[in-house]
Image (spheres, grey):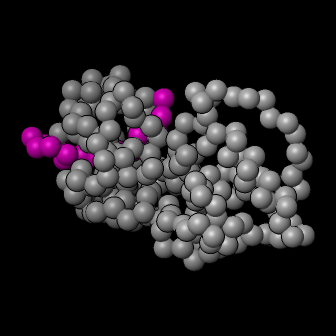
Amino acid sequence: MNAFRVLMIAAALSTSSSLAATYTVKSGDTLYSIARATRVDAPTLMKLNRLNSTTIQVGQRLNIGGSAAPVVNRPAAPQPQAAAAPSRGGVFVRSAANRWLGIRYVLGGTGGGGIDCSAFTMNVFRSLGINLPRTAAAQWRSGSPVSRRDLRAGDLVFFNTMGRTASHVGLYVGDGMMANANSYRGRTVVEPLFSNVYWASRYNGARRVLN
């Protein structure tokens, strides 16, 4: 989200009557841009507003929980487009992924007692209000293809580990790293993606389900 969008949302909050703890969705807003501007994480916004997904509508009034903090208006220095924040949902994806790290790997497991690769990604996105299919092969057919050079935090990354396409899935978290439920290590971990020979040689591609 660029600096102009932050200022627009901040201005909307500062001019709300008596700083009421609500925000009215405007054209171009996403749940993640609103969460960043209001400092209320996306999962909390979803709970406060009983949202079943991250889809929001222009004109929709969102409860942002408590009184909005006063906004100090300062002139913003012009910023080039390249300086805009990378992924709108990257911060929230990494936060959600952290909640599932260190859990024991169990083939077919879907909960806190044990989890496999596709259940890991499914649970991370479920906490963001996005429903993914249960298997890695089905997740491979979700979203839109992303080239290796355009990867950003929140993209699903797929590997051929069993002689077939997309037999393993992980979650790209930025800086050349991915989070995944790793059967060899026996738990969910964050590890290098392309600097790891094993993963680099088995990489199939990526899909983007978080825009």
Q: Give the camera-side residue of 6 and 168.
A: 6
Horizontal arrangement in the rendering, residue 68 relative to residue 121 (left or right): right
Q: Residue at 21% x, 26% y: name it.
A: 201
Q: Give the camera-side residue of 65 and 200.
A: 65
Residue 120, quarter of the rendered image: bottom left
Viewer can see residue 64? no
Residue 46, quarter of the rendered image: bottom right
Viewer can see residue 157? yes
Q: Residue at 64% x, 39% y: name it.
A: 2
What quarter of the picture does the N terminus occupy?
A: top right
- Give the answer, above or below, for where 76 lies relative to 211: above
- Give the answer, above or below, for where 65 lies relative to 105: below
Q: Which residue is at the far bottom?
A: 50
174 in the magenta segment: yes
Residue 114, quarter of the rendered image: bottom left
Q: Give the camera-side residue of 155 and 201.
A: 155
Q: Residue at 73% x, 50% y: name it.
A: 8
80 in the magenta segment: no
Horizontal arrangement in the rendering, residue 104 relative to residue 142 (left or right): right
What is the magenta range?
A: 161-175
Q: How many marks?
A: 0
Horizontal arrangement in the rendering, residue 38 relative to residue 131 (left or right): right
Q: Residue at 83% x, 70% y: name it.
A: 20
Question: Percent from the top left, x then y, of residue 112?
Answer: 43, 63
Question: Percent from the top left, x then y, of residue 90?
Answer: 53, 44
- Give the answer, above or below, for where 193 lies relative to 106: above
Q: Give the camera-side residue of 59 and 72.
A: 59
Question: Percent from the top left, x then y, of residue 82?
Answer: 58, 27
Question: Percent from the top left, x then y, of residue 96?
Answer: 52, 54
Horizontal arrangement in the rendering, residue 158 relative to residue 39 (left or right): left
- Give the answer, above or below, for where 120 lies relative to 48: above
